[in-house]
Amino acid sequence: TDLMEQPPRPTMFDFHGVCMTKYFTSNWDDVQNFKARPDDILIATYPKAGTTWVSCILDLLYFGQTCPNRQASIPIHERVLLLTFFIPSGKDFADQLPTTPRLIKTHLPVQFVPKSFWEQNCRIVYVARNAKDNAVSYYHFERMNYVFGPWYDHVKGWWEKKQTYSKLHYMFYEDLIKDSGRELDRLCSFLGLSPSAEEKEKVLTGSTFDNMKQNKMTNYSTVQLMDQTVSPFMRKGKVGDWKNHFTVAQNEEFEEDYTQKMKHTTLQFRSEF
Ligand code: A3P
């Protein structure tokens, strides 16, 4: 794609204490007034933490058997809609998701989530990824546009929410890499699903990095706005890629700052195995 055809990068500004762009705030009232249904499932992540991976797993879990055409013909971002982005009005947004449950994703920090999700006691799956790999992945994706505020506030904010809101399942990208079968079992138990061994195998096969990278419906190749010659959406999918990007000195500086910022939380990450 010719770079000149890309829309200009939007200005970032402070929005209730969080760095945002107009793409995610212009329809704020519609977002806040969004009417969640009790069986909606919200996938919440800091950008680049594994949103698409877990979206693909959930979509296969719920619709892999009943609507196989869906996986073969509809891009993942149309099967699992981004809450903030695609709402011209709350009604239109809901209409685009005729299936039940509706799978909805968001990158919003916990305090910005429309209140109807809490009121309806919806199930929420939060996916967190260690700071360094998340930063590297985000760098390649956005060239350092840190919208949605600091990673720290995001992962800690959602972690705290989990202490009081029982329908929040907090997942780690690293656990998914380490043992996707075990993580799938845990996810199913949270969702109250009991798929057969064969169904689970299909979910796991359909959501491997290689299969998602090959699949036009999950690799974002249908989205013109992304110039994947710069960096493919399904880039590496590894734990510890940060080592190829951080110098020893940068890592030390990072760790010092990290220790400070993570001092008062029980949340723990692995950034290598
Ligand atoms: P990398 O850039 O490190 O490769 P999101 O979907 O939240 O935007 O996250 C994208 C990141 O998740 C990318 O990380 C991408 O490669 C990785 N990813 C997506 N699907 C994956 C899978 N099935 N297995 C491992 N990593 C996956």
Image: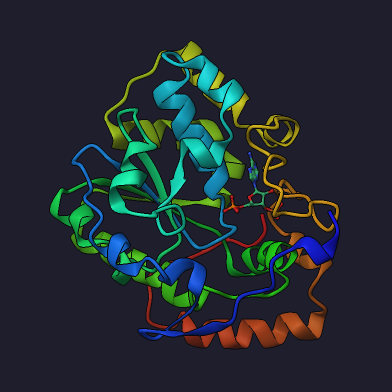
Q: Nearer the viewer, residue 152 or 108?
A: 108
Q: Quadrant of the C terminus?
A: bottom right
Q: Residue at x 45, y 61 (%)?
A: 107
In the figure, 40 relative to 171: above or below? above
Q: Would residue 108 be seen by someone viewing this image from the given angle? A: yes
Identify the colour scheme used: rainbow
Q: Would residue 182 be seen by someone viewing this image from the given angle? A: no
Residue 230 percent coordinates (x, y): 84, 58
Q: Residue at x 75, y 31 (%)?
A: 214
In the figure, 152 relative to 35: above or below? below
In the figure, 13 relative to 87: above or below? below
Q: Residue at x 49, y 40 (%)?
A: 55
Residue 153 percent coordinates (x, y): 42, 76
Q: Residue at x 17, y 48 (%)?
A: 121
Residue 267 percent coordinates (x, y): 42, 67
Given the current orientation, which residue lies at the most extreme left position?
A: 119
